[in-house]
Image (cartoon, rainbow, N blue to C red):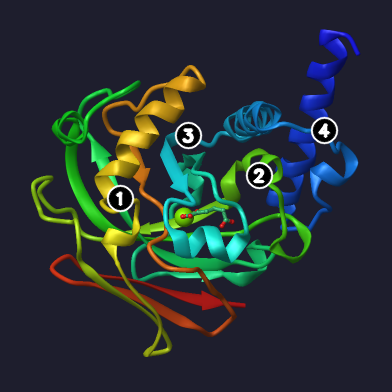
Amino acid sequence: MSTMEIKRDMASLAAVVDEAARTATAIPQLTERVPDLTVEDGYAIQALSLARRLGRGERRIGVKMGLTSRAKMAQVGVDEVIWGRLTDAMRLEEGGAMSRANYVHPRIEPEIVFLMKKPLSGEVSPLEALAAVEAIAPAMEVIDSRYQNFKFALPDVVADNSSSSGFVLGNWHKPETAIDNLGIILEADGRAVQVGSTAAILGHPLRSLVAAARLVSRWGERLNPGDIVLAGGATAAHALAPGMHVRAVYQNLGAVSLTVTE
Ligand code: OOG
Ligand code: MG
């Protein structure tokens, strides 16, 4: 295949994952159609699918890290840290509602989010990463793999923007707030469905920010002032259903909630 043909192929695969997300339709894994699809191809497809979102007027507002905890890796059977791009259209109102109809098979997970005040990229130490942070907050991410049965290989999930589909942010706290080992309870309709700690995120959520700086620069990008960075689920994700009220309660940081409608 010529370089042109390969590029055209990537663009058509980007259209497939983007349309699946836009129309909330499950699709077969890309690796079924293209068995030799690489992780590099996956990131190329992800970038092209984001360009389609930007073309529809969405604005890029940061990145999300994925599979930064054992619980998450075990749940989806992929054991490599990944990243995805977030847009303003994915933001959900804290305490507000999300419509189940806009997703294929949404799941929710408790996370920590960083707000950047300085650019960050490449190899940095945790202290350097912290010096670039404006604030931290508790958050929940709504993930929605576009693949049938939420089943994928590494290149698939990367191409599908690492299952990015929504997020809710809680109240901001000072960057020096201790976040290394805070208890978290994820509740569905008042019942604890997941219990964990921020320590599950690579031992310390700041390590996820260090990894974000390294990974984005590998793909020619950087974290910018004003960007948010979701550090990754601290527990396994919980499947969402209409009528469900979910809340993540954090030691010292407060709580974040959402209600699912039809
Ligand atoms: C991949 C995305 C993982 C996280 O926080 O670990 C992720 C998936 O589980 O579908 O967002
Ligand atoms: Mg996540």
Location of residue 191 by image quarter: bottom left
143 or 260: nearer the viewer: 143
Which disc number belongs to residue 113? 1
Mark 1 or mark 3: name the one nearer the start of the chain: 3
Quote the CA–CA distance across marks 3 and 2.
26 Å
Label 4 is placed on what type of residue?
Answer: Asp
Q: Give the residue number, with chain letter if any, for mark 3.
A: 59
Question: Is 65 rendered above or below residue 122?
Answer: below
The residue lying at 48 percent from left, 69 percent from top is 236
Q: Tell whether 236 sits left or right of 5.
A: left
Mark 2, residues whose alpha carbon is within 10 Å: few (<14), some, or many (≥20)? many
The residue lying at 67 percent from left, 38 percent from top is 159
Location of residue 246 by image quarter: bottom left
Quote the CA–CA distance across marks 1 and 4.
34 Å
Mark 1 or mark 4: name the one nearer the start of the chain: 4
Q: Give the residue number, with chain letter if any, for mark 2.
A: 154
Q: What secondary structure is marked by label 4? A: loop
172 or 158: nearer the viewer: 158
Mark 2 or mark 4: name the one nearer the start of the chain: 4
Q: Give the residue number, with chain letter if any, for mark 4.
A: 36
Label 3 is placed on what type of residue?
Answer: Arg
Label 1 is placed on what type of residue?
Answer: Val
Q: Position of residue 232 (x, y in %)?
A: 41, 53
Label 2 is placed on what type of residue?
Answer: Leu
Q: Viewer-nearest of labels 1 and 3?
A: 1
Q: What secondary structure is marked by label 3? A: loop
Mark 3 or mark 4: name the one nearer the start of the chain: 4
Position of the C terminus, as image quadrant, is bottom right
Mark 1 and mark 4 residues within 8 Å of each other at the beta carbon: no
Q: What secondary structure is marked by label 1? A: strand
